[in-house]
Amino acid sequence: MNTIVKYFCALPLLLATCFAQQKSKSVIVEPGVSLALANARSAAISNISYKLHFTIPAEQKASIETIENIDFKLNKLFHLQVDFKQNEDHIKRVTVNGKDISIDFKAEHILIKQEYLKIGNNRIETAFIAGNESLNRNKDFLYALFVPDHARTVFPCFDQPDLKADFLLSLTVPTDWKVMANAAKRDSVVQGKATTYHFDRSDKLPTYLFSFTAGKYALIKRKIKNHNMEFLHRETDSAKIKFSVDSVFVAHRDALDFLEDWTAIKYPFQKIGFVSIPDFQFGGMEHPGEVQYKASSLFLDQGATKDQFISRSNLISHETAHMWFGDLVTMKWFNDVWMKEVFANFMADKVTEKLMGKNTFDLKFLQDHYPAAYGVDRTLGANPIRQQLDNLQEAGSMYGNIIYHKAPIMMRQLELLMGKDDFQKGIREYLKKYSYGNATWNDLIAILSKHSKRDLLSWNKVWVNEPGRPVFSYRIEYEKDKISYFSLSQNSETGQPKVWPQSFTVKLVYPTGDKILMVNAKTAKTDLVEAKGLPKPQYILFNANGAGYGLFPIEKEMMANLFHIKDPLERASAYIDAYENMLSGKYNKPGELLGLLLQGLAVEKNEMNLRLITGYLTNIYWVFINGEVRNTIYENMESTIWSAMEQQQMPNNKKILFNAYQNIYLSAEAGKRMYDIWQKQTTPDGVKLLEDDYSALALTLALKTDTANTILKEQLARTKNEDRKNRLMYLMPALSLDVNERDLFFNGLKDRKNRQKEAWVTNALSYLHHPIRQKTSIRYLKESLDLLAEIQKTGDIFFPQSWLAASFSAYNSKEANLLVQDFLKSHHGYNPNLKDKILQATDNLRRAQRIVK
């Protein structure tokens, strides 16, 4: 080879080497995973594989020794940050491309200098002690829960959603434990009292979806159609097992069938498995191959209501929908976390519609989503569906009722705007294009815009990128008892001129027949020209079909005829409007609405509607009626609810009213009645109570009587399931008659180890802060706010809001409101997301200052 040829052949290599050796601009090393770090890594890293071996001892507090290989490809050199949110002493060894290096650890990151790396394939080997925080270790089981950024608390990784990887996992566990992970078990090796399980290589997953569980479980296997399914659980009640297991498998089958058909994509992962976990933090979590569920959501008994059965089906459908929406196609950054949740809820609702019928679906959709969305969107802390996120450590604050409940309403309106067929075509194209990859909301909108003639960008601006809801008003004029003019107007609740394009119905009610008007509200004012010339109605029911989103006007005549409205969906819409108008101070004082709802308890026969109005009724009773007035009405409330329970015919309706009675009773006579029911386990005619019901009743009795310790000890002796027994033991100090013991319990929550079972904590707080106990518990409120930042830092995604809700939702006093205001005023520069959570959780307290008399 001559010299010139050699030179030109070597030139590309020389240039590549020079380019590779150029120093990239360093990303600041700071706690969490910043957007800058995430962007730098996603631009340089690909082809990631994790190989992990966890040695898990039987002893709960013993260290978990772990070995890890991270294989990846680099297309440019830079100083690499590997996320690991533990103390440096957890790291035993770091090897890069076969060379041991000194441990360089800073601000939750293992730092790998670029001189140890190379363009192309690299390997980082680490030996370390796994973090316990997100492994949820219990006495004889554990489960890994890494959403949204908690994988880095357990093992070193690139903890961001757009760096998908495959995982090769092995677990060494006690021999009497069972295991489940994302991939199928390949083999197992028994060594004395331990067994090592090797799993197949997983599908491509972001770190937050990697998961496993191990412990003393029962295993059930089923083949449903073409799907092999595995189910781990810890339930010991044979009646619950017999009553629930088949239904759980069938619900998964139904959801899979629907989603495969609707998306035109077969189930996209290698295995189907799910595990039932006692007191799980969420309803469920969608890890492919190892979906985690709260045990009480799956295992129902013969006393379960229709709403509970529908909720179970909906939950299973939600987590199954995530296999396509979130798992197959994942958001690029957690500011779009709402995308996976909106589609999971939206598709779960479609499964419910197919299985339950349109009427049940429409009613369920209205009741599930609208009150919860309004509960945030009407507050001073309302947030948009899509939010800004600068660091992944703040991702937990993205979650809440806006993404779970307003977003499905938005998506339903989008489907109406585009048409079902075009909407489905767009979603199918989106899933196909981004399969096993990542996408943003803008990517989706771009595809949907191809299938629609509507201006989706303008629609997107107000629905997705801005908070709040519209307030509707109307103007109607008559000439000779006929409508000459009828219009609806909307603006934002804060008074700003905004328009939420949407469709809903208005119903004109006449003695001999009704007229339904379809409203397409695209502008600030909508003229209902179809109404011109129609006779003057007896009353008008706004948002009759429950599809509209916002605060709608109500008429006195409608309220007077509320229980004569025949359609359950229309009644539900009217109930919600009546309650929202009470909160706004526009119509209905709390006492008036309370009295009206009481009248409906014996009349309302629809189970879901009865549950809705008893929820409103009990909330008004405890929060929007002052204590002095409550003391004058509770006996009438008790007798009215009990009488309504006796008049209702359906067992589920009777049970709903029994639960309402249990919630509100205060008299000694009612207390004796409930104690006798609990003690003798003899129920009112038609009411079926099982172990969980008696346990809940025991807790209520302990709260409202002076024999709390005796009752709870006896209930503890009755409880056979170890997990439920442990929960009861945890709650007992929070219900103690001794104020000092309650103080000790609350002060103990300042220690993180006492907050590990978050569902137990929030349950205990609801008893500590019950209106009956508020004279002694109000002093906990400031400390609860002081702890919030720590709660957000150390807890799971829903814990900050559930901590606040359990602490503040039952207060209505000026003292409590002043305490909140003083906290906000004295904390300038406070985390804005947490401030919004406070404003959301204390909105009823704020409103109570104006409407409670």
Image (cartoon, rainbow, N blue to C red):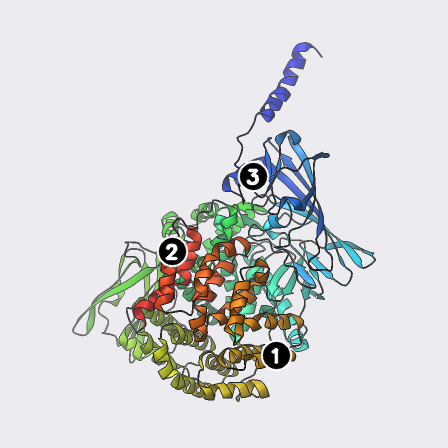
* Label 2 crowd (10 A; few <14 / some 14-19 / many >=20): some
Q: Is residue 314 visible?
A: no
- On residue 824, which mark appears? 2
Mark 3 vs mark 2, CA separation in Å: 38 Å
Disc 3 vs disc 2: which is toward the camera? 2
Compared to 792, does 296 lie above or below? below
- The kind of secondary structure element at disc 1 is helix
* Label 1 crowd (10 A; few <14 / some 14-19 / many >=20): some
Mark 2 vs mark 1, CA separation in Å: 41 Å
Left/right of residue 585 with respect to residue 75 in the rendered view? left
Q: Nearer the viewer, residue 325 or 78?
A: 78
The residue at which mark 1 appears reads as 713
- The kind of secondary structure element at disc 2 is helix
Position of the C terminus by quadrant? bottom left
- The kind of secondary structure element at disc 3 is helix
Compared to 640, does 332 lie above or below? above
Residue extending farthest left: 480
Position of the N terminus by quadrant? top right
- On residue 273, which mark appears? none
Residue extending farthest top: 3
Query: At x 54% / y 44%, what residue is drawn?
Result: 33
Query: At x 40% / y 86%, what residue is drawn?
Result: 635
Residue extending farthest front: 740
Mark 1 vs mark 3, CA separation in Å: 56 Å
Left/right of residue 19 with respect to residue 66 in the rendered view? left
Residue extending farthest right: 192
Disc 1 vs disc 3: which is toward the camera? 1
The residue at which mark 3 appears reads as 42
Name the residue type under label 1. Answer: Lys
Q: Is residue 769 visible?
A: yes
Name the residue type under label 3. Answer: Ser
Name the residue type under label 2. Answer: Leu
